[in-house]
Amino acid sequence: MPKDGIGASTKRREDIRFLTGKGRYTDDINLHGQAYVHFLRADVAHATLNGIETQDAASMPGVLRVFTATDFDGVGGLPCGWQITDRKGQPMQEPKHPIMAEGKIRHVGEIVAAVVAETLDQARDAAEAIVLDYDELPAVIDMKAAVQEDAPRVHDDLTSNLCYDWGFVEENKAAVDEAFLAADHVTTLELVNNRLVANPMEPRVAIGDYAAHDDSSTLYTTSQNPHVIRLLMGAFVLGIPEHKLRVVAPDVGGGFGTKIFHYAEEAFCTFAAKQLKRPVKWTSTRSEAFMSDAHGRDHVTKIQLALDAENNFTALRTDTYANMGAYLSTFAPSVPTWLHGTLMAGNYRTPLIYVNVKAVFTNTVPVDAYRGAGRPEATFQLERVIDKAARELGVDPAELRRQNFIRKDQFPYATPVAVEYDTGDYEATLNKALELSDYAGFANRHAESQARGKLRGIGLAHYIEACGIAPSNLVGQLGARAGLYESATVRVNATGGIVVMTGSHSHGQGHETSFPQVIAQMIGIEPDQVEIVHGDTANTPMGMGTYGSRSIAVGGSAMVRATEKIISKAKKIAAHILEASDADIELKDGKFSVAGTDKSLNWGDVTLAAYVPHNYPLTDLEPGLEETAFYDPSNFTYPSGCYICEVEIDPDTGKVTIERFTAADDFGNVINPMIVEGQVQGGVAQGIGQALLENCTYDSEGQLLSASYMDYAMPRASDVPMITVDHSCQTPCTHNPLGVKGCGEAGAIGSPPAVINAVLDAMHRAGKPVAHIDMPVTPAKVWAAMNA
Amino acid sequence: MKVQMRVNGRQVSGEVEGRTLLVTFLRDGQGLTGTHTGCDTSQCGACTVHVDGLQVKSCSMFAAEADGAEVTTIEGMANADGSLSVLQQAFQDHHGLQCGFCTPGMVMAAATLLEQTPEPTEAQVRHHLQGNICRCTGYHNIIKAVMAASGQQVTQVAAE
């Protein structure tokens, strides 16, 4: 067996280039003859755009051309990849999403004009000479105000600012309402899931290039899914057939969802490069990123939990407003609906659930998936309302959860919100987290904090998520306009080395290291004989990319299927050479042998025979050893876990410090524990950021108040503690070949409610029974709540 | 105007405008793309380099200000034979990086810390890295890597 197969914490091979400055990120690419674009962006949120004076700018030094919306005749709007059907069976309202503002400005940061020049400084200088003639309109920012009848319209051609009013499961609504009437106890909670900006450290970049000799276009872009960009931009925006369009996403410096989507800047650079017959490059500044990257979260929710006299959950209903921003980003409509409503059962047996979501247009940046996408919003409200119920009923929050868990022997478990969990053991992760966090020893630590004049609290949260997005058949029924399989081509070279071309994309997840571990295990060779190629539509099969914790569960499964085909063919070749039957050939430790004999061939002997077919069964088998597989899962995967947070509060300042954080996750089987633990730690830090620090906020006129790192509080090294992680509770996924579930989003999903539950617990223990406090729990908010 | 400086031990020169930032000179002028630009308010630290032995955010300094200076970037941090330095190796050993974008700045900042404080405490490492934002790792493994590079037993650091 290879020493670095499945389960080994193999060091990452990609680290060498990143640690020596040899990474190749999109902004590191400079093409011969490249010009630069600077986008002039709207500085008001809502206005009628009467005219744009570009003549002065066009005549400035180095300027090649100034573009405005009228230059895009024949170019389509940016497409939305998911259509939601509302409670009445009607399709959502879907406004056009132009590359540049057409007659109207709808959010601060919207592109109004673009200057392409020889240098970036020349483009910036010229943009200052553009004169906009506009009449400012009242902006709609608050979601509930936006759905009032007399609210200003974000889109004049829509009937209202309501994108859709979605009910799920609509047929259950009456039964849910009845269960509430019959309940012994009802806990009600109103809360906000704060708007966030994903903030991968690498800002977005796009470089368009056009080759006149074969009329082909290439886009280099910071994307999590280059094939998706090729399809959307080629087919819907620019009308370039896929065989004439190549999209390359090289090293990408973090994504967290915000680099899934197709953005106007990508289409512009590709379009302008063809117009100007020059490569056109755009590099986002961080300030631009804040007002042009799709934002995340931004839900306002009322949730109610009904319980019977024995504290069993009998029903749950929620009422949510979800911000779409000014336009529908690529997958925006799916986030508050199918990625949120279907998770409202959580880890519990609640028999009746009804979820209502009103998606609203406002004069803000579009909102779409951010790490977890819908599942953090579902988990936060559910785990908060359970904690509130426990407090109201005077029971231990851990025990109230335990009592209502779906039990280990109840899997597969069909929830009332349309999904079937394949496996899980929620008590196991609860017990593991209680043990690792020394829950029993909390009283001592509380007393010690108290002696120092500090408040101390402990909070826990469970989560479940639906990952591996997803079965294409299912998402197609739910309104997805894409399939959600994944692909892999496994190419075995003559001398035995392997190249895997995968449709998954790595932007920090370490696929170049973990994917070879799987193949090494299957064949019995060392992982360094396997190389991973990804991120270029020219040399990888059509794939859907990386998001939703799907790479190993779906992309890894495709790789396994392709490798199985390789092994099957290699056995046939070996059988021929060894003059045995296929069925008698065994592959172990990279060696083919005939069962019960001492006849064997090395891996390299067989791969060489495939390409030097001198003694080869040409009548039965083609030469060569290369196979492709597309894998479409039969279900989501359902990672779950229990997170426990312990905080200290300084009563004089209201500052919350996280003293301990414990994560016990069930990810099923684990390929590389080191990488998995890193994913959880990073996710937890982002969740802590949401809970304590981060808030994307607008004023009433639609000005973005948090548009730089001076205003948007990113978690820094002193804001997060060491994080205890455990993934020893493993209930392997039953429907994919590796038994894996995915780990990328868990940390960001499970941590915010654990933090808030801990903060409220600390206040409660100090005689300040605050029922709820909205994120982020800044010192000012905590101090005010304690001194109200 | 023309500027000249020593970058990673090599004498270099180039034409710049007065407004050209040091990071732009290094990336676009010298092709040293290991130094990254992650923000425009000198908050994130991805562009951290050493100028005359001091830790500097190269987005907050004009190229002209570095005229005649000794500059070290991430490309100059490996051992002479090209192998990873102790600090770089510790980042790999302890999984102190994921997407790699903040990593050059983290390594440059941590190198300065270890020069000033050969055996820093966890709190000292966290304090020194306050000006470097990482969005991937939650800092956990970065802290471990820096402490390990200083020769300390990191299992005592982690709460795991």
Image: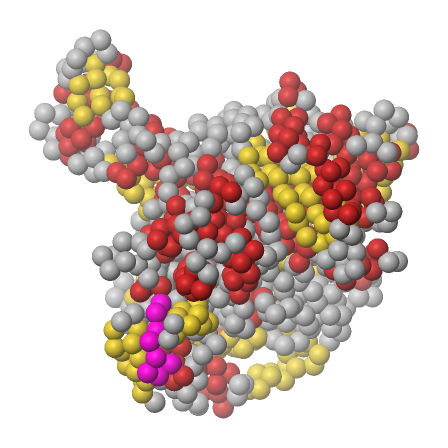
Instruction: Inspect this view and state whether residue A50 appears.
Output: yes
- Where is the N terminus of chain B found, in terms of image quarters? bottom left
Residue B118 appears left or right of A355: left
Residue closest to the eye, A737 or A597: A597
Residue closest to the eye, A252 or A759: A759
Q: Is residue A423 magenta?
A: no
Please give the name of the residue rendered at 31% of the width and 87% of the height, measured from the top-left corner: B2
Q: Quadrant of residue A786?
A: bottom right
Q: Quadrant of residue B11?
A: bottom left
- Where is the C terminus of chain B found, in terms of image quarters? top right
Please give the name of the residue rendered at 69% of the width and 44% of the height, measured from the top-left corner: A646
Instruction: Inspect this view and state whether residue A144 appears.
Output: no
The location of residue A529, given as percent across then percent down, is: 26, 38
Residue closest to the eye, A584 or A133: A584
Please give the name of the residue rendered at 37% of the width and 75% of the height, measured from the top-left corner: B52
Residue A306 appears left or right of B123: right
What is the image's colouring?
A: secondary structure
The location of residue A366, given as percent across then percent down, is: 62, 61
The location of residue A478, given as percent across then percent down, is: 61, 40
The location of residue B14, given as percent across then percent down, is: 30, 82
Residue A232 appears left or right of A516: right
Please give the name of the residue rendered at 62% of the width and 30% of the height, measured from the top-left corner: A432
Q: What's drawn in magenta, residue-wise?
A: B66-73
Q: Name above or below for residue A97 compared with residue A403.
A: below
What is the count of numbered marks? 0
Q: Is residue B68 magenta?
A: yes
Outermost residue on the left side: it is A614
